[in-house]
Amino acid sequence: MICAVVLAAGAATRFGSPKQRLLLPEVLERVRASAVEDVVVVLGAHEVESDARTVDCREWERGIGASLRCGLRALPQEAAAAVVLLADGPRLAPEAVDRVIEAWREAGAEVVAATYGGVRLHPVLLARAAWERVPDAGARDLPAVLVPCDDLEPPGDVDYPEDLRVGDRPADDQRLA
């Protein structure tokens, strides 16, 4: 079983409001369009309603690695691997998720990451054998087999309201609350 862990625990201080509430639905829609079989969303600083299963990470302030470890612990025992995604990456391509899964199946690597123009970004797949080695800095510090996704748009990284493009927000919400 391949699961997804969507990290949505941060305080969003640079954004000025809980950006997860705005961006998470689009990310989840894109994750569900991939080969992932189950999804867990890691929350922390803010309560966020979601139609996905959520886990509250009380250690979210320790960093992305702490949030990731919370999400990994919440996955079912039959999960062989987890695809790690960020809730503030609204342009995630489901094809990128599928490519890292396929590369993992072919290579059997413990860590597989998508690259865009040679830059390592998300999604990142962690085989169960790598879960115990996740440092506080997160999966980016783990060596990975790299999967080129140059023909796809990078998932994005929304830190500030001006990072949003018209297509990054729901059509019925034209203002940031």
Image (tube, rainbow, N blue to C red):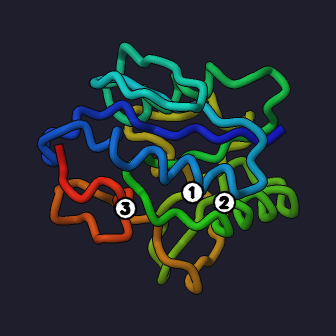
| The one of 96 and 111 positioned closer to us in this rendering | 96
What separation in Å lies between label 2 and label 1 (alpha carbons)? 6 Å
Tell me the element at label 3: loop
In 3D space, how far apart are the residues under numbered discs 3 and 2 (Cα atoms)? 25 Å
Q: Quadrant of the C terminus?
A: top left
Across and down, in percent, residue 115 comes to 54, 72
Report whether 144 appears left or right of 80.
left
Q: Which mark is residue 123?
A: 1
Residue contact between numbered discs 3 and 2, judged by CB atoms under 8 Å: no
The kind of secondary structure element at disc 1 is: strand
Dot 2 falls on a residue whose secondary structure is: helix
Q: Which residue is mark 2?
A: 97
For the residues marked 3 and 1, what is the alpha-carbon distance in whole angstroms? 25 Å
Among the two numbered marks 3 and 2 on one chain, the one whose residue lies closer to the N terminus: 2
Instruction: Using the image, determine if residue 147 lies above or below residue 176.
Output: below
Report the amino acid beneath label 3. Answer: Ala
Residue at screen point 34% across, 40% down = 20
Q: Earlier in the sequence, mark 3 or mark 1?
A: 1
Q: x, y percentage for residue 80?
A: 81, 36
What residue sits 46% from the left and 66% below the top? 91
Q: Which residue is mark 3?
A: 171
Q: Earlier in the sequence, mark 2 or mark 1?
A: 2
From this view, report whether residue 1 is shown above or below residue 156: above
Give the total number of marks visible in the rendering. 3
